[in-house]
Amino acid sequence: MLHLTLFTIFGVVCVAGAVNLVAQRHPINSALSLIVVMGSLAVEFLLLGAEFVAAVQVIIYAGAVMVLFVFVIMLLNAGEEEHTRGSRVALLFGVPGMLIGSVLVAWELVRSTPGTEAAGVGALYGSAKTIGRLLFNQFLLPFEITSVLILIAIMGAVVLARRES
Amino acid sequence: MPTGNLDTTTFVIASIIKIVLFLLVLLTTVAYTTWLERKLVGHIQNRWGPKRVGPFGLLQPLADGLKFIFKEDLTPPYVHKYLYLLAPFLSLTLSLIAISLIPIGGWITVAGVHTAVQITDVNIALLIILGITSIGVYGVALAGWSSNSKYSLLGSLRASAQMISYEVALGLSLIGVLILAGSFSLREIVDSQAGTWFGFIPKWNIFLQPVAFLIYLTAAFAETNRIPFDLPEAESELVAGYHTEYSSMKFAMFFMAEYANMVTVACLASVLFLGGWTGPVFGPAWLQGLLPVIWFLIRVAFFLFFYIWVRGTLPRFRYDQLMGLAWKFLLPLAVANIVVTGLIVALRS
């Protein structure tokens, strides 16, 4: 019961943050809303028993990636978004499209509900030890390839940002 | 609800009492650390510190607190109001949260309730503390940006960049301790340091991980923006850095947040490297519960003294030297420490 209450509360906070992200005109407010979304996602992970992923989500995503987003917004001195007049084409195709999309998603969810079960607190195993073992035994190749991918991204950023000498 | 060996009501009441006690002690410590700093730096500089307000100037923090309350609370008209007000609250709240995870002593029995001297023993406590440090960067970044002034913006950008750089070295230096202790829980890390070698050398992590200790200490000095890494707040550099436009209570909150961070770092260093509350325990039951807390507080006091001693002694680093130190020296050293520790542990088992 407590589990369901907490899940609902933080789910609502997450969705409200996401809606606020799109609705805000100033990019810094959007960035802060995204941080709220990341935080509530971390709580959802915690509710599932994935404590390590929850902590790492806060440290890396909310605490490092979003800091860099905020840096960019601060450095570029991004101002408020201009209020443009709505487009009629967007209204004509967008609203029916969104309705059809929501109906499809809802139908799929309702159709597959009997096959799913609710995950209780701690239903999944998420301790650092278990994740470490999985990463270095079963998922070693994806882990190493992802590391190389991140290294390539860093090198690409350094090359792009280097001053022409 | 998992409450250990207590029923729910007792657990809730005990937790509330612990929270109130810990916060009171923390805030008093923060206030008296400012007194200690002024006295010690004064003596290092061959002058008296505060000595008029009360005996030895001991009521000076009280006088400072009253001054902050009575000061004019000015909100400049050109700031982003919402973020300007949020930033000091964010800084202070995050600094105060970390104390809830740190174990101060062993177990005590008060009025028949057997409880740990710690608000909560989480099994990922070390990760949560790193997470709190990461989010703490926002207090600084938002303060500078929302102040809408060039000194504030530059100061906050420098401070935030410094903080995120040294966080990496900080986190990596702790991995050596983690490998040795096998758990993120702070209580278990302290328990793994119990006992002695040859009967008199305590099994503290500082002897097993000296390099990690030095990296941790350096990174912690930089995280808390203290000398020799306090360029973002240096008066001659950037007026007052990110808290230039703040006055009265909001400035006091930044001030308190900085000292609370210092206390947290000192507590963590005691727990991770100096064996927490281990020490000779003797006497009647109430003394046996109290002595570990006293041994812990002695270690914390030593670290605070060390912080202030360094402040009075060293000059500050230039900003590029500061960043070069983090990325080109501390980070490779921390990684090498992890590799060596892992190798030794793997070869021994």
Image (spheres, coloured by chain):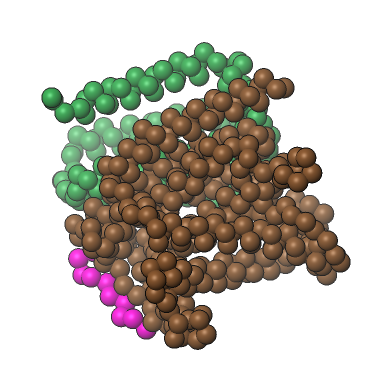
Chain colours: A green, B brown
**Could you say which is closer to the camera, residue B156 or residue B296?**
B296
Q: State whether the magenta stretch is mostly helix, strand or loop.
A: loop
Instruction: Residue lying at the far left in this picture: please name it.
Output: A165
- How far across and down, in percent of the image, does residue A146 sit? 44, 19
Determine the residue located farthest toward the top in the rendered image: A141
Q: Please state the horizontal and vertical placement of residue A70, each as a whole percent of the image.
A: 31, 45
Q: Quadrant of the C terminus of chain A?
A: top left
Above or below residue A1? Residue A45 is above
Q: Is residue B84 above or below residue A61?
A: below
In this view, B153 is above or below B330: below
Identify which residue is drawn at 42% across, 76% down: B49
For residue A120, side relative to residue B218 (left or right): right
- Check residue B77 for magenta coloring: yes
Residue at 33 percent across and 44 percent down: it is B322
In the shown orientation, is residue B82 left or right of residue B14? left
Q: Does the magenta run of residues contain A64?
A: no
In the shown orientation, is residue B109 left or right of residue B53?
Answer: right
Magenta span: B69-80
Query: Which picture quadrant has residue B47?
Result: bottom left
Q: Position of residue A49 (x, y in %)?
A: 64, 38
Residue B2 in view in this figure? yes
